[in-house]
Image (cartoon, helix red, strand yellow):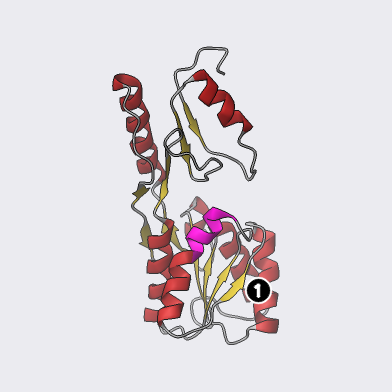
């Protein structure tokens, strides 16, 4: 892409620690913004922007408590990843304020892992009655696995996902999710890189765009 003369980059990295592609961009002197996942800590070169995962995690956890849940868990997301830690951070903050020990089951961000985790929760933490999941795929799998064991989601177990994908409205019950307003984030990022290209001013990194808890039947 550099050889073809692009003006700049918006980079959404896969799960990898390799920053070699960003080194090539730096050598070319091109504007580049990292979104969603950070693979290079040099925000003076590569500003980073993402949704406000911490705020969404906090709001979701408080919602579960407000709905009467007594023991809460966080399920999904690869251990040690920054995005997992951010999506978990609000949960950890709220349960600590409640004097609870956290229940954390990390793993693949997949439907299959969510289904397996339903059994794990029943076997090891049957007292859990509220779950915040790393993403909607994990949440949908958790709901399916729980219901297969006779657990009524929305009554016996309240579940919240992250990302507000289309399937949230089509599941039974419909899934409560933290919506990250990706179109809004795209507009913010586009305006920042266009301004950078226009006047040469690199935007400061670190901004988090607003998120919203979309409440449905699962919680």
Question: Magenta residues?
Answer: 81-88
Does residue 216 show up? no
Q: Position of residue 122 (x, y in %)?
A: 66, 82
Does residue 171 show up? yes
Which residue is outermost to the top? Answer: 4
Q: Does the magenta stretch include residue 158?
A: no
**Residue lying at 65% horizontally and 73% vertically, measured from the top left:** 118
Residue 9 vertical position relative to residue 208 in the rendered view, above or below: above
Q: Is residue 192 left or right of residue 84?
A: left
Observer-nearest of 113 and 30: 30
Packing grade of label 1 (10 A; few <14, some 14-19, many >=20) is many
Residue 213 vertical position relative to residue 104 in the rendered view, above or below: above
**Residue lying at 62% horizontally and 86% vertically, measured from the top left:** 126
Count of picture labels: 1
Among the 4 quarters of the image, the one containing residue 20 = top right
Q: Is residue 82 magenta?
A: yes
Question: Which quarter of the rendered picture does the C terminus lie within?
Answer: bottom left
**Residue lying at 52% horizontally and 19% vertically, measured from the top left:** 28
Q: Where is residue 58 in the image (x, y as percent from the top left)?
A: 40, 68
Element type where label 1 sits in the image: helix
Residue under label 1: 118
Observer-nearest of 2 and 138: 2
Give the dominant element type of the magenta stretch: helix, strand or loop.
helix
């Amino acid at each position: 892409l550099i050889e073809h003369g692009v003006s700049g980059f918006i980079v959404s990295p896969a799960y990898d620690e390799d920053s070699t592609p960003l080194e090539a961009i730096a050598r070319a002197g091109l504007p580049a913004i990292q979104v969603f996942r950070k693979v290079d800590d040099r925000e003076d070169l590569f500003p980073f922007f993402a949704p406000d995962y911490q705020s969404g995690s906090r709001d979701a956890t408080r919602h579960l408590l407000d709905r009467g849940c007594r023991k809460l868990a966080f399920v999904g997301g690869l251990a040690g990843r920054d995005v997992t830690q951010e999506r978990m951070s609000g949960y950890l903050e709220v349960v600590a304020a409640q004097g609870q020990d956290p229940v954390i089951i990390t793993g693949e961000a997949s439907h299959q892992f969510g289904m397996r985790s339903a059994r794990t929760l029943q076997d090891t933490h049957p007292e859990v009655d509220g779950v915040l999941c790393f993403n909607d795929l994990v949440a949908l799998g958790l709901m399916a696995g729980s219901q297969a064991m006779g657990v009524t989601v929305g009554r016996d177990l309240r579940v919240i996902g992250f990302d507000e994908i289309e399937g949230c409205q089509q599941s039974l019950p419909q899934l409560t999710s933290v919506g990250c307003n990706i179109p809004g984030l795209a507009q913010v990022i586009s305006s920042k890189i266009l301004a950078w290209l226009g006047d040469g001013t690199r935007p400061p990194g670190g901004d988090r765009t607003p998120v919203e808890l979309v409440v449905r039947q699962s919680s």
